[in-house]
Image (spheres, grey):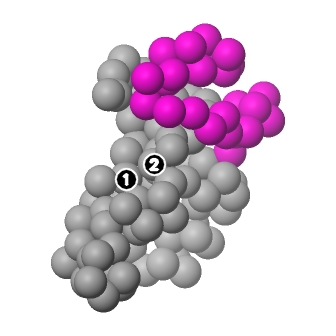
């Protein structure tokens, strides 16, 4: 299961940027893109739409289009559905390596990214 939304970039110079960067202690960063809507806010409060990979193109038509360089499409994969699919049949538990691989397959895309 995927979720798709239109987000705003959180970057150097934004309100609360200095406080956030001091808290995470990564002063070299100039931009953060994350699934966390507290940092990368939804454009027009659109929220996320859940869909299958084959439905991404039609979902993008329902969302606000990015209207500036500060806005982008975000496409993510539910890690809960991924974690269920990587269980070992004999132990019914995820190995660290498989769970890490599932997390690495999370997708964060921008305009023009085609999934599936």
Left of 38 or right of it: where is 84?
left
| Front one among 27 and 110 | 110
Label 1 sits on a secondary structure element that is loop
Residue 1 magenta-highlighted: no
Identified at 36% across, 18% down, the residue is 112
Label placed on residue 8: none
Q: Quadrant of residue 50?
A: top right
Within 10 angstroms of label 1, few (less than 14), some, or many (20 or more) residues? Answer: some
Q: Residue 97, percent across and down?
A: 20, 78
Image quadrant containing the C terminus:
top left
Within 10 angstroms of label 2, few (less than 14), some, or many (20 or more) residues? Answer: many
Identified at 40% across, 43% down, the residue is 108
Identified at 57% across, 33% down, the residue is 51
Q: Residue 81, percent across and down?
A: 48, 58
Left of 116 or right of it: where is 56?
right
Label 2 sits on a secondary structure element that is strand
Residue 51 magenta-highlighted: yes
Left of 32 or right of it: where is 116?
left
Magenta span? 41-69
Q: Relative to residue 108, is residue 83 depicted above or below?
A: below
Q: Residue 66, percent across and down?
A: 57, 20
Q: Is residue 74 visible?
A: no
Q: Which residue is mark 2?
A: 77
Residue positioned most to the front: 90
Decide which of tag 1 and tag 2 comes sooner along the chain.
2
Instruction: Please say if the residues under marks 1 and 2 sit with CB atoms less than 8 Å apart.
Output: yes
| Front one among 36 and 14 | 36
Q: Which residue is mark 1?
A: 106
Q: Quadrant of residue 64?
A: top right
Residue positioned most to the bottom: 91
């Amino acid at each position: 299961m995927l979720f798709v939304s239109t987000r705003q970039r959180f970057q150097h110079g934004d309100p609360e940027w200095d406080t956030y960067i001091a808290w995470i202690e990564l002063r070299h960063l100039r931009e953060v893109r994350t699934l966390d809507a507290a940092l990368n806010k939804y454009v027009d409060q659109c929220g996320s739409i859940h869909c299958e990979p084959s439905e991404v193109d039609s979902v993008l038509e329902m969302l606000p289009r990015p209207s500036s360089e500060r806005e982008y499409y975000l496409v993510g994969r539910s890690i809960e559905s991924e974690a269920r699919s990587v269980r070992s049949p004999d132990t019914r538990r995820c190995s660290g390596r498989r769970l890490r691989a599932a997390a690495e397959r999370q997708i964060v895309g921008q305009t023009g990214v085609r999934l599936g």
